[in-house]
Amino acid sequence: MDVLADVVDAMRTGPATSGRTDVRGPWGLGFVHSSGATFHLVLQGSAWLLPPDGHPIPLGPGDAVLLPRGLDHALVDHPDSAVVPFDPTVAEPPQGQGARALLLCGTYRLDRERPHPMLTRLPDVVVVPADPGRHRSLHTAISILGEELDAQRPGATAVVPALVDALLVLILRAWMEDHNCPTDRGWARALTDPSVVQALELIHERPGAAWTVAELASDVGLSRAAFARRFTEAVGEPPLTYLSRWRMTTAARLLRDHDRPLATVAKAIGYTSEFAFAKAFKRDFGVPPGTYRKQLTLAL
């Protein structure tokens, strides 16, 4: 069980949207709050990120930026450049005759109603610089994207969406690798602590099992108290709280992606009673599972 891939798959509610932006200085693009996670890649040239709070951040070729909560921000060629609202329908935004920058900007559609702890514990701005020798998979993908978008070769419309979809995992993995310190608390630690990640794998692989803290601790080779402490510090909530959350997340994904009977969904996440499952689901999502599935169908 690949926990990171499973979490990202559960968080996503639809395909990513992205667009190539080719600009020459002076230029400035303002991005309004998005319901998903906004991302930017600097494929050629340079830029500055004006975050919602804090100082401007310089960006160079190969740098990747993710704003998990989609907050207002801007990209500019210089911190003093004028900013105009970004319009993805406009092929060439207002610009000058100066240095060229090639950008890829887009949004990942993520579940905002029940965000996963991995998402909520990320900072407002995640920057992964193009550090030579590190995160080769990410930077190889960015390099290929740059070539495909700049050359517009045959087949690019198939290659680009696949790479953009993979970028979310690649950016998250790279950022967590850069922020994995023994003293840190968060998912960077959770996915590298052997005992915690083993417990997460068990929960993700068998969410319907009747797990107890003692059983999980025994399976990962720790005492009950030591396991509960390490899991809570890394993940941000106790093991059984996370188990309950993941069960409902799994149920929502099954309702979204499959046409299974509610009784089958209930059993898959550990409920022997469809009524008990419906009650628990409504408590978390505000509507019964059948209504939730209808709402998703109408939204498509």
Image: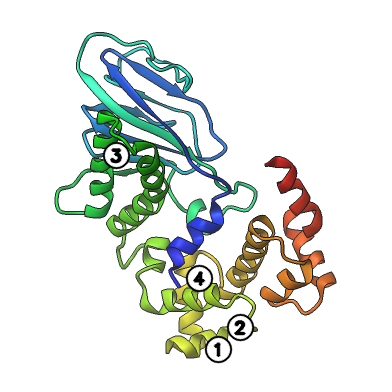
* Image disc number at residue 155: none
- Horizontal side of 171 relative to 226 (left or right) equals left
Residue 181: x %, y % from top left: 30, 63
**Mark 4 closeness class: few <14, some 14–19, many ≥20 residues within 10 Å:** some
- Callout 2: SS: loop
Which residue occupies the foreground of this view, 8 or 225?
Answer: 8
**Residue at (71%, 47%) from the top-left corner?**
296
Is there CB contact under 8 Å for labels 1 and 3? no
Calculate the distance from the C-alpha at mark 1 to the C-alpha at mark 2: 6 Å
Q: Report the colour scheme.
A: rainbow
- Callout 3: SS: helix
* Image disc number at residue 211: 2
Q: Which residue is mark 4?
A: 232
**Residue at (76%, 46%) from the top-left corner?**
295
**Mark 1 closeness class: few <14, some 14–19, many ≥20 residues within 10 Å:** some
Q: Which residue is mark 3?
A: 145
Calculate the distance from the C-alpha at mark 1 to the C-alpha at mark 3: 46 Å
Q: How many marks?
A: 4
Q: Compared to 273, does 53 lie above or below?
A: above
Q: Quadrant of residue 135?
A: bottom left
**Mark 2 closeness class: few <14, some 14–19, many ≥20 residues within 10 Å:** some
